[in-house]
Amino acid sequence: MKKISLVTPVMAMIAGALVFTSCSKEKSSVTGWDYNNEKNGGFEKTPYEEQETGPGLILIEGGTFAMGRTEQDITIDWDNIPRRVTVSSFYMDESEISNLHYREYLYWLDRVFGTDYPEVYKRALPDTLVWRSKVGFNEPYVELYLRHPAYSDYPVVGVNWLQANDFCAWRTDRVNEQILIREGILRVNPAQINEDNFNTDAYLSNQYEGLVKSPLNDLNPNRDTRKVIMEDGILLPRYRLPTEAEWEYAALGLVGNTVFERVTDRKQYPWSGHVVRNADEKYKGEMLANFKRGRGDNMGVAGHLNDNADITAPVISYVPNDYGLYNMGGNVAEWVADVYRPLSPEDKDDFNPYRGNVFKTQLTDEEGQVAEKDSLGRIMYRDVSEGENEGRRNYTKADNKNYLDGDEPEYITYNFGATSMVDDQARVIKGGSWKDRAYWMSPGARRFLDQRQATDYIGFRCAMHRVGSPVGFSQKGKRAKKR
């Protein structure tokens, strides 16, 4: 008995130490094994609080809204019939992309690809000739608008839909590269050239190493260090063009007109009310956006210019909407991601509606490994094949741009120049511009243009998917208390 009594306290101390040690690490609720313990295999669970807000972005808390016209259909197109949909939370640029932003992009392309692949730089150049008019004198804008520092903060124009998408892809890589440098994982490498440049997909596919400063410790007992992976939550999702639904939802800014779940006031424009002048006593009568008030009136009378802009205005101008977004109702119209169809409001899903999906996968070799990068350092993608989709219930083909509207023989097929100007290259344009009447500033208004064309009144801004909770970190605690 004495022996047992002597041993028991010792065993209790050992057991207590084991409990204390095990409590210091989080356990799996399905296996009981420790997370982040290199002694048992090293499976990692990353502590994660909140998605970082990328440069230039504002969180747009999602929700339901009536998508479609908020103004009378003066074009009689009947292509924006109101319909209730839900949009997930996402991020959107505070303002349109400016000439300065785009020149930064052009400079990088010239520095990295200019010597061996000058066509890459040339392909990205905006079409400055869009300013020309047969019976108007706009040559100064042709020569100066993109390059002169006086216009640095003005929205870039002359950019087609394809160029806007390329900008978004470039921005994704530059932001993620900067994050890895900031976190001390990579070193700054100003000597990047040709295929030796940071690409997010290439980095995640182990096709790009970079100048490593301090790799992460790997808890896998078979390895010492590792690169950042998506599970670490360090890298941001892709910058991209917003969908039509996202753009329209963000432009309306109904968050400022909501009491609990009731929208108290219907909006006709991105601001409250049904007029285009400011009702605030301090700014009473001043225009709320940059648009064309009437024939021959682009900015008003000298001494009291009504919108203070003959063509475009700086991207941070006028009163932002209730999400804090500038110029959602004027200045330049904007490209969005969607392929245009007149019947899109009826055909698209009521959750995150979008037409334009082409499902792709990374190009792999015979062993299933990601193929080598292309000459520009980018991972190559291909459309998924119908064989790969065999047995799927949600889709069978890669290209779904014309789903329900031309993908079967009995449906109408849109062929440019043959039956209609609407085809799979027609992309939606949203919002009004310096060249438009007030009608086009209604968020529900829709237009379209071939994705290869550009104008002097169309620009763009970027968006990004929101991962995890639909509300920001500052709101999580408030929501929890209510429950």
Image (cartoon, rainbow, N blue to C red):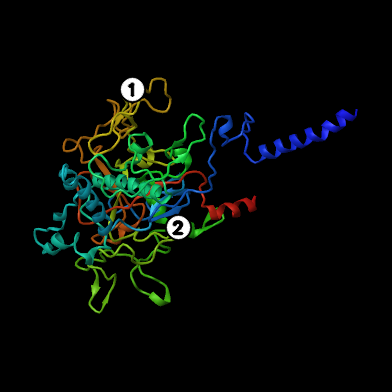
Tell me the tag on residue 386.
Answer: 1
Q: Amino acid at mark 2?
A: Arg
Q: Secondary structure at mark 1?
A: loop
Discs 1/2, front: 1
Image quarter of residue 1 = top right
- Between 466 and 357, the residue placed more toward the observer is 466
Query: Contact, CB < 8 Å: mark 1 with mark 2?
Result: no
Q: Earlier in the sequence, mark 1 or mark 2?
A: 2
Q: Residue at x 27, y 38 (%)?
A: 377
Residue 68 visible in rendering:
no
Instruction: Tell me residue 445's x, y (percent).
Output: 33, 52
Q: Is residue 474 left or right of residue 266?
A: right
Q: Is residue 152 depicted above or below 43 in this figure?
A: below
Q: Residue at x 17, y 42 (%)?
A: 117
Q: Amino acid at mark 1?
A: Glu
Q: Residue furthest left?
A: 134
What is the crowding at mark 1: few (fewer than 14 residues within 10 Å), some, or many (at least 20)? few
Q: Is residue 361 depicted above or below 257 in this figure?
A: above
Disc 1 and disc 2: Cα gap in Å?
A: 45 Å
Tell me the tag on residue 266.
Answer: 2
Q: Residue furthest right?
A: 1
Instruction: Tell me residue 192's x, y (percent).
Output: 26, 45
Q: Is residue 436 left or right of residue 130?
A: right
